[in-house]
Image: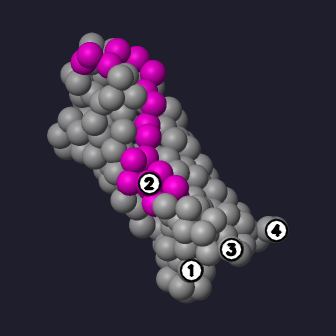
C-alpha cells in the first residue's frame, strides 16, 4: 500500500512544481505590451498543506483573467477545489499584477464552501511563467486564509 501512496505523492508534487497556465491569444508578444487585451485560462494542480490538520490534500485551481491592453493589470474569476478529509471549494474575483513579464502576483478575496457552510476567504498567489510550445508553465506558490484557518 505504501508504493501507490508514494507514487501519488510524487505525481502531485510534480504537478505542483510544474503548474500550467494556458493562455488564449498571441504567444509571441509579451503579456503587458499588447495593443489589445488578452484572456488567460489557467489550470494548476497542487499539493496543499493544511496546518490545522497537519495533512496534505490534492488541490485544483482554475481561473479566467483578462489582461488590459498596454498594462500589467488583469481581472478575472478564480476557483479552487481541495479534496482532503473535508472537500472545500473557493470562488472569488482575482486581481492580478505582472511587475515583470514572467512574474504574476494575484489577490483573490472570495468565499469558501464546505458542505452547507459558506465563509469568507482570501488567496494570495504568485506564479513564475515560462513558455513551452505555446503553453505557459511554471511554479506557483499560494497562501490562503479563511475563518477556519490557513493553507
CB within 8 Å, label 3 to label 1: no
Q: Which residue is mark 3?
A: 1
Residue 78 is left or right of residue 68, and the answer is: right
Magenta residues span: 11-29
One can see residue 87 in this view? yes
CB within 8 Å, label 4 to label 1: no
Q: Nearer the viewer, residue 78 or 15?
A: 15
Q: Which residue is mark 4?
A: 116
Q: Which residue is mark 2?
A: 14
Check disc 2 and report its element: helix, strand or loop: helix
Question: For residue 118, what is the image quadrant?
Answer: bottom right
The residues tagged by marks 2 and 4 sit, at their Cα atoms, a distance apart of 33 Å
Classify 31 as above or below 4: above
Can you name the residue that lies furthest to the left here? Answer: 100
Residue at 23% x, 39% y: name it. 102
Q: Nearer the viewer, mark 3 or mark 1?
A: 3
Q: Which residue is mark 1?
A: 55
CB within 8 Å, label 2 to label 4: no
Q: Nearer the viewer, residue 39 or 8?
A: 8
The residues tagged by marks 2 and 3 sit, at their Cα atoms, a distance apart of 20 Å
Amino acid at each position: 500500500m505504501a508504493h501507490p501512496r508514494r507514487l501519488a505523492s510524487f505525481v502531485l508534487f510534480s504537478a505542483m512544481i510544474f503548474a500550467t497556465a494556458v493562455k488564449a491569444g498571441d504567444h509571441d508578444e509579451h503579456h503587458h505590451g499588447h495593443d489589445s487585451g488578452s484572456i488567460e485560462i489557467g489550470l494548476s494542480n497542487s499539493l496543499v498543506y493544511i496546518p490545522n490538520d497537519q495533512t496534505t490534500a490534492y488541490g485544483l485551481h482554475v481561473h479566467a483573467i483578462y489582461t488590459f491592453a498596454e498594462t500589467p493589470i488583469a481581472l478575472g474569476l478564480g476557483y479552487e477545489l481541495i479534496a482532503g478529509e473535508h472537500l472545500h471549494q473557493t470562488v472569488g474575483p482575482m486581481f492580478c499584477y505582472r511587475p515583470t513579464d514572467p512574474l504574476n502576483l494575484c489577490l483573490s478575496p472570495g468565499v469558501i464552501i464546505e458542505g452547507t457552510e459558506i465563509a469568507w476567504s482570501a488567496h494570495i498567489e504568485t506564479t513564475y511563467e515560462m513558455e513551452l510550445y505555446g503553453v505557459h508553465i511554471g511554479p506557483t506558490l499560494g497562501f490562503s486564509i479563511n475563518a477556519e484557518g490557513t493553507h
